[in-house]
Amino acid sequence: MKKLVIACGLALSFNAFASGHWGYSGEEGPEHWAELSPEFSACHAQNQSPVNLTGAIKASMAPFKLSYKAGAKDMVNNGHTLQVDYAPGSFLEIDGIRFELKQFHFHTPSENLIEGQSFPMEIHFVHASEKGEITVLAVMVKEGKENPTLAALWKEMPKEGAQIDYQQSVNAQALLPKGRHYYRFNGSLTTPPCTEGVRWLVLKDPIAASKAQIASFEKTMGHPNSRPVQPINARDVLKD
Ligand SMILES: [Zn+2]
């Protein structure tokens, strides 16, 4: 059976199996997602991601708590991204709710912008609560030194539709910057079905990857895989 994967979401917890084809350009591109399938109608809703993080309101937000274990078990190329699936037992806690890390994946260029600035890459760590609520922790990637964790994860990149299993598990925590200041806003999955009600935490500090690493991800995807920024509408962006 073909494994069903959605770049920025968890099909099972939403019970919204995204069956339609979609892409990042042309007639299947982001401006047409809402018309491609009735299941994708949320892509035209009011609280969509990504956004330009600007005009953030300083708020006394409690730090989120992370307890990640080594758990990267396999990587799938679903045609939209490279997704690293994670073994159970790693958590992010915020608002008194425990969210389990399910997978993380990559976008090039970044989807969210920080004060209008784009980064060459953005990593999304996707977590789900027992009730199926979603929290995405996002980390920007700037060009710099080679990233040893990405080097380990990307030793081999699967072709579209393929999966590689890791012999040795990697801890996703190694892909986070030391600084934990963050922006917070309410948003959506950035891929169809664009489901809303997602808690977004975007770390202010980027991590680094080499030019060659970023280029090899771009080459494997064969196209940019970023949704353009969406209107903020009535939402506030908070910062700590
Ligand atoms: Zn994503």
Image: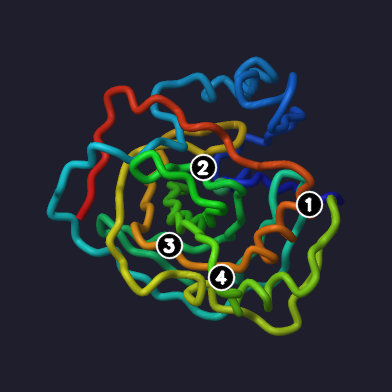
Where's residue 115, x and y in %?
A: 33, 42
User: Element under label 3?
Assistant: loop
The tag earlier along the polypeptide, 3 or 2, is 2
Where's residue 75, x and y in %?
A: 72, 64
The tag earlier along the polypeptide, 4 or 1, is 1
User: Residue 176 appears in which quarter of the rendering?
Assistant: bottom left
CB contact under 8 Å: marks 3 and 2:
no
Residue placed under numbered mark 4 in the picture: 88
The amino acid type found where label 4 is placed reads: Pro
Residue placed under numbered mark 2 in the picture: 111
Q: Please tell me which residue is depicted at 36% across the width and 74% down the height of the picture.
A: 178
Q: Please tell me which residue is depicted at 68% across the width and 78% down the height of the picture.
A: 152
Where's residue 61, x and y in %?
A: 18, 55
Q: Is mark 2 within 8 Å of ligand 1?
A: yes
Q: CA distance from mark 4 to mark 3?
A: 26 Å
The amino acid type found where label 3 is placed reads: Pro
Q: Nearer the viewer, residue 136 or 202?
A: 202
The tag earlier along the polypeptide, 1 or 3, is 1
Residue placed under numbered mark 3 in the picture: 206
Q: Please tell me which residue is depicted at 86% across the width and 51% down the height of the picture.
A: 1
Q: CA distance from mark 1 to mark 3?
A: 32 Å
Q: Please tell me which residue is depicted at 74% across the width and 19% down the height of the picture.
A: 27
Residue placed under numbered mark 1 in the picture: 3
- Categorize mark 2 by other alpha carbons within 10 Å: few (<14), some (14-19), many (20+): many
